[in-house]
Image (cartoon, grey):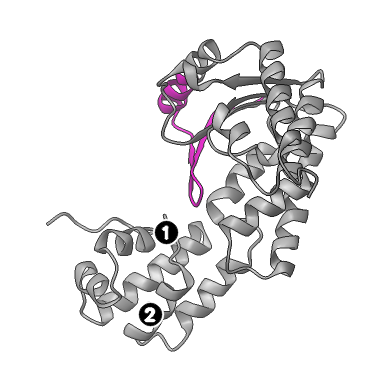
């Protein structure tokens, strides 16, 4: 049996939660598989919780706390994680984001946060965080909009974004919300520091089909890559891996439409949303 992976409780709140969970599990004399069966949940998820790669949903956290006799300690820690505006896996990335002089993004499912309108961000957050109160959602919307100041500073970074066609065609919120968001994209794309391309469905398979990708370049120091799905993200700093992602991005740029044809596609989809019933709601 391989030795358990070392934990780094100081790395993040999620890592601290994971270390606490493992300590309680071992004290209870349970294996990951046994604990998973009692929840019930796949034992592989228990492993991810303990490594700090994933934070359990609220109901799973409550069951873990009760099964392991944590007397509310796990639930209290879960609450601290939940109240943080940005999860630990995103915080380190955003610290680097503020220092970048170049950002290259591929977005598979949603408009990047730095280009989202308030209404689009609100609709997206309400869907992804259904347990949050309206007050919590508004706090997250404000935090997301405040991040956009990066693009309006005196020397903003180059922001090159490739949007999968799915981003344009999958409605988020009402047709009116989508029309406003796409109009905002066209406006952003006219900035001298921005480039926008659309990757059409007709381009077929491509090397970044697993999720979204960001490459960050800096005036000093090595580049970094960041991969993200709806509820997790990974910052990649190994230069060999960053080089692999950079090559993948080059291939995406070659497959995507040029900037002007891309804007034509966006305008066309905008008109489709305008034609929907109740498009202004």
The residues bearing labels 2 and 1 have C-alpha atoms spaced at a distance of: 18 Å
Q: Percent from the top left, x then y, of residue 219?
A: 68, 24
176 in relation to 197, above or below: below
Residue 233 shown in magenta:
yes
Q: Percent from the top left, x then y, of residue 253?
A: 55, 15
User: In this view of the protein, which residue sits in the foreground, 160 or 189?
Assistant: 189
Residue sitting at x 69%, y 30%: 272
Q: Which residues are magenta?
A: 220-248
User: In this view of the protein, which residue sits in the foreground, 103 or 254?
Assistant: 254
Q: Percent from the top left, x then y, of residue 248?
A: 45, 20
Instruction: Determine the image quadrant of residue 30.
Output: bottom left
Residue sitting at x 74%, y 69%: 135
120 in relation to 245, above or below: below
Outermost left residue: 1
| Residue position marked by numbered label 2 in the rendering | 63
Residue 234 shown in magenta:
yes
- Looking at the image, can residue 68 be seen? no
Query: Mark 2 or 1 closer to N-term?
Result: 1
Outermost right residue: 154
- Looking at the image, can residue 242 be seen? yes
Q: Which mark is residue 180?
A: none
| Residue position marked by numbered label 1 in the rendering | 52
Instruction: Determine the image quadrant of residue 22.
Output: bottom left
280 in relation to 257, above or below: below
241 vs 46, left or right, is right
The N terminus lies in which quarter of the figure? bottom left
Residue sitting at x 45%, y 78%: 74
User: In this view of the protein, which residue sits in the foreground, 23 or 121?
Assistant: 121
Q: Residues within 10 Å of mark 2 (few under 14, many from 20)?
A: some
């Amino acid at each position: 049996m391989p030795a358990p992976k070392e934990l780094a409780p100081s790395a993040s709140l999620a890592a601290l939660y994971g270390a606490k969970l493992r300590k309680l599990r071992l004290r209870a004399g349970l294996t990951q598989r046994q604990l998973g069966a009692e929840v019930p949940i796949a034992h592989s998820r228990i492993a991810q919780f303990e490594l700090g790669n994933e934070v359990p949903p609220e109901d799973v956290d409550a069951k873990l706390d009760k099964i392991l006799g944590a007397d509310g300690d796990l639930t209290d820690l879960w609450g601290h994680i939940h109240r943080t505006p940005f999860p630990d896996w995103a915080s380190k990335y955003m610290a680097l984001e503020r220092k970048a002089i170049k950002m290259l993004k591929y977005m598979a499912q949603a408009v990047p946060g730095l280009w989202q309108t308030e209404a689009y961000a609100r609709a997206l957050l309400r869907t992804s965080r259904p347990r949050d109160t309206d007050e919590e959602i508004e706090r997250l919307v404000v935090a997301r909009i405040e991040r956009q100041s990066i693009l309006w500073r005196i020397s903003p970074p180059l922001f090159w974004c490739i949007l999968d066609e799915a981003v344009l065609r999958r409605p988020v919120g009402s047709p009116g919300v989508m029309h406003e968001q796409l109009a905002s994209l066209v406006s952003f794309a006219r900035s001298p520091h921005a480039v926008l391309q659309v990757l059409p469905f007709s381009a077929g398979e491509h090397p970044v089909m697993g999720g979204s990708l960001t490459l960050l370049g800096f005036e000093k120091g090595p580049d970094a890559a960041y991969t993200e799905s709806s509820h997790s993200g990974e910052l990649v700093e190994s230069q060999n891996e960053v080089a692999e992602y950079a090559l993948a991005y080059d291939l995406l740029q070659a497959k995507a439409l040029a900037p002007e044809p891309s804007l034509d596609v966006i305008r066309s989809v905008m008109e489709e949303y305008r034609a929907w019933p109740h498009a202004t709601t």
